[in-house]
Image (tube, helix red, strand yellow):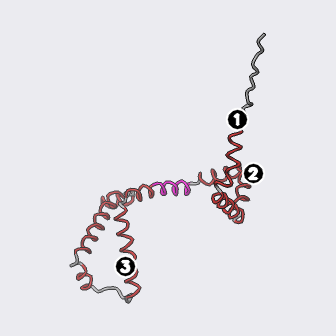
């Protein structure tokens, strides 16, 4: 009679490919592992792990203190102002901001080299002859006009203006 063919299936260990990759990893990623160990040591030296451990242990207390701090009117105004300032900075053309930074640096450099004596009337008028000065003054006056339109008018000021 016929004999059955024995079927032997290898046992499938789903972790076997992971073990093989793990065994090859130190050789394949030696430089990255060394960098990671160095980073971990730096974090340990800076006591970052102690702080994180404390935050995790007392996380509810930390969150409670943070929420209490954010409930203060000053904190709410500060966060609101921070959001508004980030929107303002996001709307400014980087080239314009770079020009402002360069002008500040150049002006401060010139100021440190010269006397601190303020310019006279005719020296100021002489500076107005330069188109760059007039361009900047035009920008400043447009800004001041727009700012004036957007400033809130207090009841006291509007009452005295009606007189």
Question: Counting other residues with Cα less than 10 Å from the Cα at mark 1, is it few (<14), some (14-19), or many (20 or more)?
Answer: few
Give the magenta part as a residue range. Answer: 73-83
Q: Which mark is residue 14?
A: 1
Residue drawn at x 38%, y 84% is 111
Query: Which of pointers 1 and 3 lies earlier in the amino acid sequence?
Result: 1
State the SS at label 2.
Answer: helix
Badge 3 crowding class, 10 Å Cα cut-off, few under 14, some 14 to 19, many 20 or more, is few
Question: Element at badge 3?
Answer: helix
Tell me the residue that label 3 is attached to: 107
Q: Residue at x 69, y 47 (%)?
A: 22
Q: Residue furthest top?
A: 1
> Which quadrant of the structure image shows residue 141?
bottom left
Numbered disc total: 3
Q: Quadrant of residue 94?
A: bottom left
CA gap, disc 2 and disc 3? 52 Å
Q: Position of residue 121 (x, y in %)?
A: 26, 84
Horizontal and vertical percent position of residue 33:
66, 57
Task: Name the residue nearer the viewer: 20 or 154.
Answer: 20
What residue is disc 2 on? 57
Label 1 and label 3: CA atoms lie apart by: 69 Å
Secondary-structure class at tag 1: loop
Sequence-first disc among 2 and 1: 1
Q: Quadrant of the C terminus?
A: bottom left
Position of residue 154 in the picture relative to residue 130 (left or right): right
Q: Which mark is first along the chain, 3 or 2? A: 2
Quarter of the figure with residue 151:
bottom left
Give the vertical position of 21 relative to 89 (above or below): above
Are circles 2 and 3 on residues that touch, CB within 8 Å? no
Residue 107 horizontal/vertical position (percent): 37, 79
In the rendered image, residue 28, in percent from the top left (x then y), is placed at 64, 54
Determine if the magenta segment contains residue 20. Answer: no
């Amino acid at each position: 009679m016929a004999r059955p063919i024995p079927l032997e299936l290898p046992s499938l260990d789903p972790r076997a490919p992971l073990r093989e990759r793990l065994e090859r990893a130190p050789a394949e990623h030696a430089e990255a592992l060394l960098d990671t160990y160095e980073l971990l040591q730096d974090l340990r030296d800076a006591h970052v792990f102690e702080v994180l451990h404390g935050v995790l242990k007392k996380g509810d207390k930390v969150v409670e203190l943070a929420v209490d701090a954010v409930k203060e009117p000053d904190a709410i105004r500060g966060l609101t102002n921070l959001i508004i300032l980030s929107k303002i900075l996001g709307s400014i053309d980087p080239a314009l901001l770079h020009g402002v930074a360069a002008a500040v640096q150049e002006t401060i450099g010139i100021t440190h080299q010269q006397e601190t004596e303020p310019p006279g009337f005719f020296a100021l008028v002489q500076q107005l002859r330069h188109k760059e000065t007039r361009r900047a003054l035009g920008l400043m006056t447009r800004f001041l006009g727009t700012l004036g339109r957007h400033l809130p008018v207090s009841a006291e000021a509007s009452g005295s203006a009606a007189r």
